[in-house]
Image (cartoon, grey):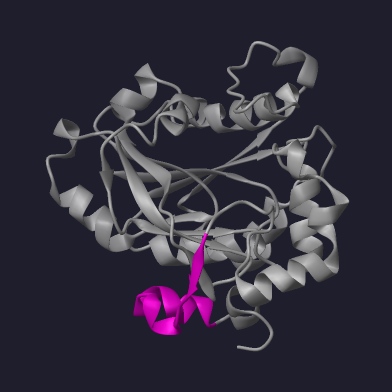
Amino acid sequence: MLIDAFTYFNEKELVELRLKYLDPIVDYFIIIESNITFTGKEKKWNFPSILKNNLKEFSHKIQYHQLNIKIDEIKNEESWIIDDIKGDDFWRIENFQRNYIKTACKNFSNDDILIISDLDEIPSVKKLNFILSSDFEKIAPVALEQHLFHLDCNYVRLESWRGSIVTTMKFCNEFSPQKFRRLRNRISHFTDGGWSFSSFGGYERVKEKIESYAHSEHNSDKFKSPEHIANCQRTGADLFHRNVKSKKVERSFFPENLLKLMDKNPEFYFGKNN
């Protein structure tokens, strides 16, 4: 059995793409949504309306969990801060939500296979089929190296991104999902393992993400101006002035079965001029 588990914020287009693309191969989708943003602000439950209006055909496969987080009760949640980044509570909120995947999956069997991802990290069906045909218990866990996109699909980063983790429930029961996340660059990996679609949806959505996610050091006016975001989308420059390089890609970069789904919402994936 193959289980796909991820956290949800408000990415309607991406959750539709993910479920429709992975439906032929995934047995259950485990979706975790929190009552607060990673910065601790209260938010509404966004997924129920998406399920009712857009994803009813997958309702028999979806196990949706609403997670009520109280910040003062998660002080001991494992947190991992890089380069003295401030905002420890922000990371604890994100990690607590991710670690709830383990609780949500407690009724599955040890030999079931689990994908642990952020929603925007879409694993390759081709690579998942390879995993399912292998003696996976002998090589688990593995990270999937994915093609990284920011803002839209016109520029791909030249750096690789290890996003989705594939493991067995046996290992998930022994270690936390956050621990897998933390070690994803140290474990075995498969190349060409999918796509990461980060910060898509246009100016308002990008601004909302910057103000809501755990990287509080990015929540600055210089990164949130409409002109800056539009320039990065037009040129492929990094949103946060990091020293990364991108290259222009054509639509043929994507497999046909994924591209057909992306073409149902071309502005979201390829921008207004495509």
Residue at 67% in and 24% down: 84
Quadrant in the picture for the N terminus: top left
Quadrant in the picture for the C terminus: bottom right
Residue at 68% in and 48% down: 9
Task: Please check the rendered image and state whether residue 271 is part of the magenta-colored stretch, yes or no.
Answer: no
Between 177 and 45, the one lying in front of the other is 177
Residue 102 locus on image (x, y percent)? 47, 27
Position of residue 57 relative to residue 242, above or below, is: below
Residue 93 locus on image (x, y percent)? 69, 28
Between 19 and 226, the one lying in front of the other is 226
Can see residue 65? yes
Residue 56 locus on image (x, y percent)? 57, 63
- In this rendering, the count of numbered labels is 0
Residue at 19% in and 54% down: 130
Q: Residue furthest front?
A: 243
Residue 151 locus on image (x, y percent)? 64, 66
The answer to whether residue 225 is left or right of residue 197 is right
Asked where in the image residue 257 lies, by quadrant, the reply is: bottom left
Asked where in the image residue 95 lies, by quadrant, the reply is: top right
Position of residue 174 relative to residue 229, above or below, is: above
Residue range in magenta is 245-263
Residue at 50% in and 28% down: 178
The answer to whether residue 255 is left or right of residue 239 is left
The answer to whether residue 44 is left or right of residue 127 is right
Position of residue 164 relative to residue 156, above or below, is: above
